[in-house]
Amino acid sequence: MKFTTRILAVSAIAMSIAACSNNDPDPRYISGQATVTFKPNTGDRYYMEVGEELAFYPLNGNMSSYPFSQKVEKRAMISYLLEEGSEPEKTPEYKNVYGVYVQHIDTIKIKQPLVYDVNEEPAYGDDPIGLYLDRTVFPTTLIEDGYLNLVFNIKYGNIKLDDPIHEVNLLIGINPDDPYEVEVRHNAHGDNSRVNNQYCIMNFPLKALPDTEGKTVKLTLKWNSSVTGKTESVQFDYRSRTDW
């Protein structure tokens, strides 16, 4: 599937949700942001998983039902309010669960990785791409809940409806000696004027990688950097999800 630079960015669905009637900041609440997985089938309430040990559930009455159709799992960025001094619950699924008021949801496009095929090499492209990797800012590139949360930017020209389409893919199976080496590839389809900058987020599920069988391994991510002009790599700790 292809995406123009105009729709490569964050949101497929955006929801603004009233959490408080007062527009002024309420000192009883701490505001925050997180990338989460909306989990549709977890008993009598659904969770927004932040990590293996941390999850939220909505206190908003209008979000008591799962907000997405067909009960499918979704990745999203949320803004939320957490009551000052809240104590976490413990559940069979998570060590720490907090009730939060969800203020805003931006869903993140989920795209399946491609298994590398040398015959398809020209189609993958090798155009530069810039990755955000600063863990002190939100959002950033990282691995959460079995997904590669890819935060990046691409350069493009004066796009019109009939102009070239940019494609961004994650390739797996690129190194027969290391199944946990993956690569981001960008095909600009000749749109190389690069006068504009597009900020983007995509999530790639890593379900197709070999099961780590409960162990934590190093996952190597490679890309052609628009910053350095050469192939760069970074490593993440990775452990397979057990509930795909």
Image: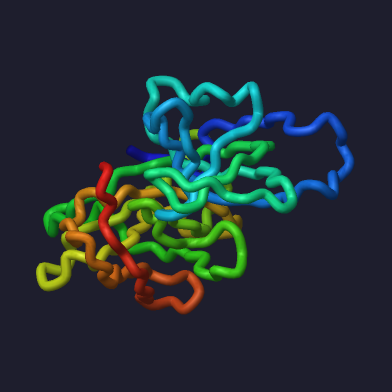
Q: Percent position (x, y) of residue 37?
A: 45, 43
Decide: is 85 above or below 129. Answer: above
Q: Is residue 56 above or below residue 32?
A: above
Identity of the residue drawn at 25% across and 49% down: 242
Residue 103 drawn above or below residue 89: above
Coloring scheme used: rainbow
Apparent side of residue 232 relative to residue 14 in the rendered image (left or right): left
Q: Nearer the viewer, residue 17 or 170?
A: 17
Residue 230: x and y, percent? 38, 77
The number of callouts visible is 0
Residue drawn at point x = 52 percent, y = 25 percent: 67
Quarter-of-image position of residue 78: top right
The location of residue 48, given as percent across then percent down, is: 49, 41
Quarter of the rendering occupied by the N terminus: top left
Q: Quadrant of residue 117?
A: bottom left
Q: Which residue is rendered at x = 23% and y = 66% of the image?
A: 215
Residue at image coords 72%, 46%: 83
The foreground one among 62 and 159 is 62
Quarter of the C terminus within the rendering: top left
Q: Is residue 1 left or right of residue 178?
A: right
Residue 90: image x %, image y %? 48, 47
Q: Is residue 182 visible?
A: yes
Residue 159 visible here: no
Say which of 22 and 54 sits in front. Answer: 54
